[in-house]
Amino acid sequence: MLAGIKRLEIVQRFQNRSIRFKLLIYFVIIILLSIVTLSAVGTGVYKRSIEDTTNEHTIQMMKQVKNNIVYYFDEMENILAYVADDNQVMSFFKKGLVAGVESTGAHEADIEKVIAMYERRHPEIAGLLIVNKQDQYVSNKMERIIRDPLTSEGWYKKAVAKPDELLLISKPIGRNIKSEYNYSADQVLSFVKAIKDPDTNEVLGVILLDMELSIFQKTIESVSLGKSGFVYITDSHGGIVYSPVNLIVYRIDNEWLESGYTSMEKIINNRAFQIMQDRFERTNWKIVSVFPLDESKSVVIKWQVYTVIVVLLTIILAIIVSWFFTNSIINPVRKLRRIMHRVEEGELHLRFKGGSKDEIGQLGDSFNKMVQEIEQLIHMVYTEQKEKREAELKVLQEQIKPHFLYNTLDTIQWMAQDRGADDIVEIIIALTNLFRIGLSKGNEMIFLEEEIKHVDSYLIIQMMRYESKISYEIQEIPESLKYNRLLKLILQPLVENAIYHGIKMKKGKGHIRIETAHIDNHLVLSVIDNGQGMKPEQLELLEQGLKDSSNPEHKNGFGLFNVNERIRLTYGASYGIEVESEYGKGTRINVYLPVSDD
């Protein structure tokens, strides 16, 4: 009974302690239990894990190397196929080299260009040689050493004997071929393929491609198998195609690899090694990995030593982490209290940013919602007062209707007609169209046909003003674009810009042309003038202003900046204005807009 009471008192005392103290005790207990468990059973588990991880890593590295090498095999095979499919190369195989422009045979220079194209794209190609059955050959980097026929070479005969196979020859020695860069047989791998006539299935010749083995070196040396592990490659006869400099590789018996085991442990120079192998399916080559087992065991021993050190450090860190952890709980509460106090003083724009979704974060979200609702109520009152004032102003504005302006212009038009003033009639009709389309009943989007009519009316008025100074033409709108919807009042500022900054500065009569086109799913409107044009530095400053609308230094008051900004705000940054100009010759302004789906 007394023992139970004492335990209850201890529990109550613990519950009354600070959060920092409680978390510290929890952390120390959990960490001590974890370390004891880790020390008891962790060594064996860790050892097996290291071995499994090492094996898995080795398999992945081998697979990576294998895939890279297979990629180069396929790439070289594709290059051989592409070269063989070339018309000039096939003509060379069928008819040989024939000089003369009118000849139907292949030209050596054309074939060399084809070879050079692939050699530039693939620097790993050490040389590419094309030989037809007449013993004629073409190559950029390889040539015959003596005059003995290449068709009697062993590699040529093997390819002809197996025309449907791609032959791989490692360490090609004894060939009647020399390379421009004098590669040794150990430095290249040869790909040989016979080429057949697609019509008769007759063998027409052979293509030989030498690939630098240094590309394998980069691939193999990029993988890491511990400190002294390595990967090497053997051909179908067990010969080493490529291996890093290592004495262990020459101690590996080829019979071990022929045993069929994909993984084995062998003693080499009194040291245990694990040897793993995999085969290339089409070539029967092997990729072999070798790494010492004592490296993984040394890791386990080091781990046991580090465990003791970690125990002490972890306890110290537990105390430090618990301190910061409790602060992470207490500090947001203090922050929320400070924000509440400032909100009480009227700073309603403040919000609590907790950055978490725990209880404190939820409390902060509720506080934010409450403050937001208060701010919305205040804004609602303000908005109601503002709308009331705007309604009063709108009542005043409604007293002047647009149709009053139209009726007045129609009256002036009838009076001018009665007096036979046709030029006044024409300019009034143009002005009426200008106002009617410009207002468009408050709509921002109009048809392209209306936009063209609007700029036509503007040009009629300008021609009346400048008389013989200006002429213009408007290209007929394609039927498919007439009812394309676009922002209104795009062309008029550009035409005005062409008049005041181009034609007005020009001596003699100026001409303006307006074109409409559908190019690459864009509606392109062009305003072309033969005015003064712009100097290169003026054009550069203008283009900078069109690209960087935020910098006022790039703008000089041209209306096209406003048009460009309206287009980009409405349709996005991929649309807008493009300017072409040459000083003394004129300017072309292209407007790029989307084609509507209507």
Image: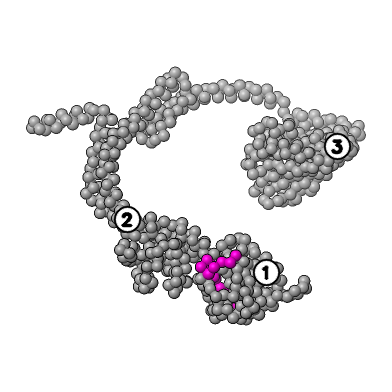
Instruction: Say whether residue 425 is visible.
Output: no
The residue depicted at 68 percent of the width and 48 percent of the height is: 522
How much space separates mark 1 and mark 3, taking CA atoms? 56 Å
Q: Earlier in the sequence, mark 2 or mark 3?
A: 2
- Mark 3 — residue? 506
Could you say where residue 428 lies in the image, as x and y percent from the top left?
Answer: 83, 33
Label ID, residue 296: 2
In the foreground, 339 or 116: 116
Q: Is residue 126 above or below residue 318?
A: below
Specify the farthest residue to the right: 420
In the foreground, 258 or 16: 258
Name the front one of labels 2 and 3. 2
- Amino acid tagged 3: Lys
Look at the image and say whether residue 349 sits in the magenta stretch.
no
- Amino acid tagged 1: Ile
Label ID, residue 579: none
- Amino acid tagged 2: Ser
Q: How crowded is mark 1: few (under 14 residues within 10 Å), some or many (20 or more)?
A: many
Name the front one of labels 1 and 3. 1
In the image, the segment drawn in magenta is 181-197
In the structure shown, which secondary structural element does the residue marked by tag 3 occupy?
loop
Look at the image and say whether residue 191 sits in the magenta stretch.
yes
Q: Where is the N terminus found, in terms of image quarters?
A: top left
Q: In which image quadrant can residue 5 be found?
A: top left
Please say which color scheme the image uses: one colour
